[in-house]
């Protein structure tokens, strides 16, 4: 499953994502990973979740992120959930066609490997295509 939490700045996307991480850690038996751009969620994310700071790596393209997520899974088959906060700030590329292609790839990867992905992104939900809206 891939779920996209999209809204304009200040609409509570990160707060909702943190709540979902907390709920997931409490009820799931597998490993939970949260990827964020900077070190803003260090004290908000439960210690049982693996917090990854994207600023420590050279996230720059969708291909890099695909490889990173694949490698993350290869290194730990117990991951059941991956949360990504501030998606567009991590990649610095808000081309909606590339986003739709990435989400389609992620959905296929999610289904194949039984990992749920929840992503927050700052954008106007009315401005995106139906290919992206299907992940809301």
Image (cartoon, rainbow, N blue to C red):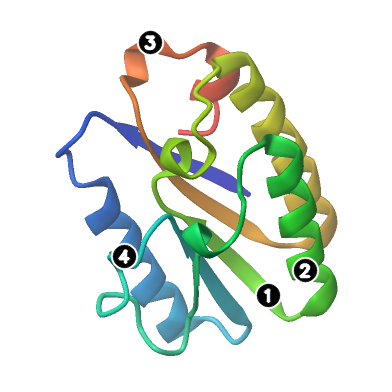
Residue 84 horizontal side relative to residue 106, left or right: left
Disc 4 crowd rating (10 Å Cα; few below 14, some 14-19, many 20+) is: some
Q: Nearer the viewer, residue 26 or 43?
A: 43
Residue wearing tag 1 = 79
Residue wearing tag 4 = 18
The answer to whether the residue labelled 1 contacts the one labelled 3, judged by CB atoms less than 8 Å apart, is no
Disc 3 crowd rating (10 Å Cα; few below 14, some 14-19, many 20+) is: few
Residue at point 47%, 42% (across, down): 87
Residue 100 horizontal side relative to residue 17, left or right: right
Tell me which label, 4 or 2, sits earlier in the chain: 4
Tag of residue 43: none
Tell me which label, 1 or 3, sits earlier in the chain: 1
Find numbered disc 4 in the image and state the secondary structure of the residue it sits on: helix
Residue wearing tag 3 = 127
Residue wearing tag 2 = 73
Residue at point 72%, 58% (across, down): 69
Measure the alpha-carbon separation of dots 4 and 1: 17 Å
Find numbered disc 2 in the image and state the secondary structure of the residue it sits on: helix
Tell me which label, 3 or 4, sits earlier in the chain: 4
Q: Position of residue 53 (x, y in %)?
A: 47, 66
In the image, residue 38 sits, relative to residue 79, either above or below, namely: above
Say whether residue 60 is visible.
yes
Say whether residue 77 is visible.
no
The answer to whether the residue labelled 1 contacts the one labelled 2, judged by CB atoms less than 8 Å apart, is yes
Q: Nearer the viewer, residue 69 or 13?
A: 69
Tell me which label, 3 or 2, sits earlier in the chain: 2
Tell me which label, 1 or 2, sits earlier in the chain: 2
The answer to whether the residue labelled 4 contacts the one labelled 2, judged by CB atoms less than 8 Å apart, is no
């Amino acid at each position: 499953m891939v779920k996209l939490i999209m809204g304009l700045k200040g609409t509570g996307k990160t707060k909702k994502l943190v709540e979902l991480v907390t709920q997931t850690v409490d009820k799931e038996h597998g490993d939970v990973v949260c990827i964020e751009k900077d070190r803003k969620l260090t004290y908000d994310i439960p210690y049982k979740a693996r917090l990854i700071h994207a600023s420590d790596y050279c996230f720059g393209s969708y291909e890099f992120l695909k490889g990173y997520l694949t490698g993350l899974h290869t290194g730990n088959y117990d991951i059941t959930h991956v949360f990504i906060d501030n998606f567009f700030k991590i990649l610095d590329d808000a081309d909606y066609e590339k986003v739709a292609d990435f989400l389609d790839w992620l959905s296929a990867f999610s289904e194949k490997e039984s990992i749920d992905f929840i992503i927050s992104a700052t954008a106007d939900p009315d401005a995106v295509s139906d290919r992206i809206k299907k992940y809301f």
